[in-house]
Amino acid sequence: MNNQITVNNLTHTYGSRRALDDVNFTVPRGEIFCLLGPNGSGKTTLFKILSTLMKPTSGSVDIFGYDLYNKSKAIRKLLGVVFQHPGLDIKLTVTENLRHHGHLYGLKGKTLKLRISELLERFGISDRSHDIVEELSGGLKKRVEIAKAMLHSPSILLLDEPSSGLDIGSRRQLSDHLSSLATTENILILLTTHVLDEADNCTRVGILDSGRLVSIGTPDELKGSITGDVVLIETTNGETLSQAIADRFDVSLKLTDNYIHIECEHGYEFVKEVVAAFPDEIQSVRVGRPTLEDIFIKLTGNPYV
Ligand code: ADP
C-alpha cells in the first residue's frame, strides 16, 4: 500500500460535453484535500468516479496501490463515503441508524457498541444518541452521516459538498471535526465544495473550472500567487472605468460583470487615489488580502458563481 490517491489524466465526457478534462493530482494520507469549484465545474463527476460509482471515459485512478477499476471491491473497504443527499433513516434514532449500518459491515455485539459510542463521542453527539434523526439540525445530521461512514474504520473518507445547506457556525464545527478526524485516525479526507471558506480550512485545495484543474496548493500557497492587496471596485460602467484605470495606473486588473478586480502593492493608498480620480464612477470599494475567490478570478477570468 502506498497510502495515497493518484489521479492520472482523468477525462470524462457526457455525450459531447467534457465534464473532466485531463485531471491529475495526488493526495497523501493524513491530508484534508478539497476540490473547489463553482456549479458545473466537474466536482460531482469526479466524486462519483472516486467513489467507484462511475467509470471515467479515460485516465486512471490508483487508490493506496489498487487500480480503481480492477480492484474496486478491495477499494470499497477502504472508503467511507458521505453523499450530498441524506442517507439516514429519519424515523430511527441516531444509534439505530448506526447499528443497522454496522450490521451491513458485519460488525456486531460489543465491538459495534464500542465503535458507535467512540464515534458519537468524537462527533459530539453522545447526548443525542436516542433522538430520532428527523429532530436533529442539519449540522448534527451531517455529523451522524459522517459517523456512519466511519463505522468500518475506513482509511479514506470522501464527502460530496458536506457543508451544503449548513449555516456558517455548523460549517466551522464540521471543519473542526474533520480536522481532528484526519489527525487522530490518520485518514485521508477528500471533499468537494463550492463554499470558499470551507476550502480555506483544508490542508490543500484543487481548483476546478469547467472540468480542468487550474491550480493546486495549500490555501496560503494559492493566495500567495497575488503578492499585494486586492481592490474590488463596483461600478455601473465596467468597460469604460477599467480602461480608464488601466490607462492611469500601473496595476493588473480583471473585469467580471460590473466588478473590477485590481491587484496592487498597497491597497489602501491606491483606493484613495482611484476614488479621487473617478469619484462619480465608483459605487463601492473593498480592499483586503487576496481570498480564494480572487485567485479563482485571476486564474480563470470568470466570476465565482
Ligand atoms: P459540479 O458538481 O461541479 O456542479 P458536475 O460534475 O455535476 O459539476 O457537472 C459537470 C458538467 O457535466 C456540467 O456541465 C454538467 O451540466 C455536466 N453533466 C453532469 N452530469 C451530466 C449528465 N448525467 N449528463 C450530461 N451532462 C452532465
Image: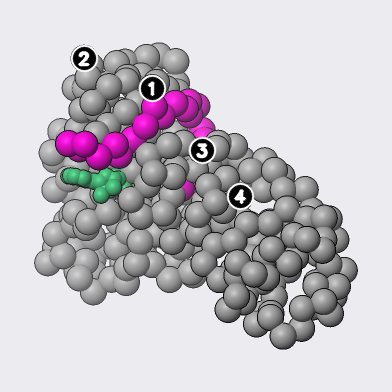
Q: Residues within 10 Å of mark 2 (few under 14, many from 20)?
A: few
Q: Residues within 10 Å of mark 1 (few under 14, many from 20)?
A: some
> To which residue does mark 3 refer?
214
Residue at image location 22% in from the left, 56% down from the top: 85
Instruction: Give me the disc on residue 171.
Output: none
Q: Secondary structure at mark 3?
A: strand
Whole-angstrom CA distance, mark 1 to mark 4, is: 24 Å
Residue 7, given in percent of the width and then of the height, sits at: 40, 24
Residue 108, given in percent of the width and then of the height, sits at: 17, 38
Whole-angstrom CA distance, mark 2 to mark 1, is: 17 Å
Residue 101, given in percent of the width and then of the height, sits at: 17, 45
Which quadrant: the C terminus? bottom left
> To which residue does mark 1 refer?
9
Instruction: Give me the disc on residue 298.
Output: 4
Q: Is residue 29 magenta?
A: yes
Q: Secondary structure at mark 1?
A: strand
Tag in front: 2 or 1: 1
